[in-house]
Image (cartoon, rainbow, N blue to C red):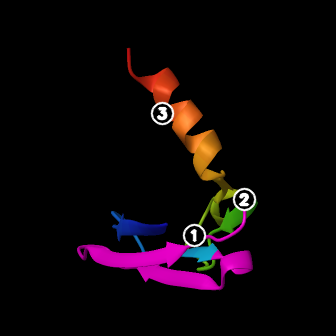
């Protein structure tokens, strides 16, 4: 399923990068940017910051976890009583 993102930056320009999904989007302070992507394979995808944004840039790294629809439904059931 498509994933819709609303991206914002508070301080400087940052860039969300999902290399394996061929997705890259800059985030500009004071602007709200709407973007989407669709991951077709389950897995763990690296999300490094792709804009040299200052001190701490090298530590700006996250992970996107993509699950099968069945795994997602199982997880949703654990989130609500």
Q: Which residue is mark 2?
A: 42
Q: Nearer the viewer, residue 27 or 70?
A: 70
Residue 58 lies, with reference to residue 21, above or below; the image says: above
Q: Nearer the viewer, residue 69 or 24?
A: 69
SS of the residue at dot 3?
helix
Q: Which residue is mark 1?
A: 54
Name the residue at 43% across, 76% down. 36
Region in magenta = 18-41
Q: Is residue 13 visible?
A: no
Quarter of the image holding residue 55? bottom right
Give the percent coordinates (x, y) of residue 64: 64, 56
Decide which of tag 1 and tag 2 comes sooner along the chain.
Answer: 2
Q: Which residue is mark 3?
A: 76
Q: CA distance from mark 3 to mark 1?
A: 37 Å
Name the residue at 49% across, 82% down. 25
The stretch drawn in magenta includes residue 24: yes
Q: Residues within 10 Å of mark 3 (few under 14, many from 20)?
A: few
Q: CA distance from mark 2 to mark 3?
A: 17 Å
Quarter of the image holding residue 72? top right
In this rendering, which labeled residue sits more in front, label 1 or label 2?
A: 2
Contact between marks 3 and 1 (CB within 8 A): the answer is no
Instruction: Answer left or right for 17 relative to 42.
Output: left
């Amino acid at each position: 399923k498509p994933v819709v993102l609303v991206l914002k930056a508070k301080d400087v320009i940052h860039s969300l990068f999902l290399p394996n999904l061929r997705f890259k989007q800059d985030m500009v302070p004071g602007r709200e940017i709407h973007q989407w992507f669709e991951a077709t394979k389950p897995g763990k995808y690296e999300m490094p910051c792709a804009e040299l944004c200052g001190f701490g840039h090298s530590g700006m790294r996250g992970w996107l976890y993509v699950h099968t629809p069945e795994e997602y439904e199982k997880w949703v059931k654990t989130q609500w009583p």
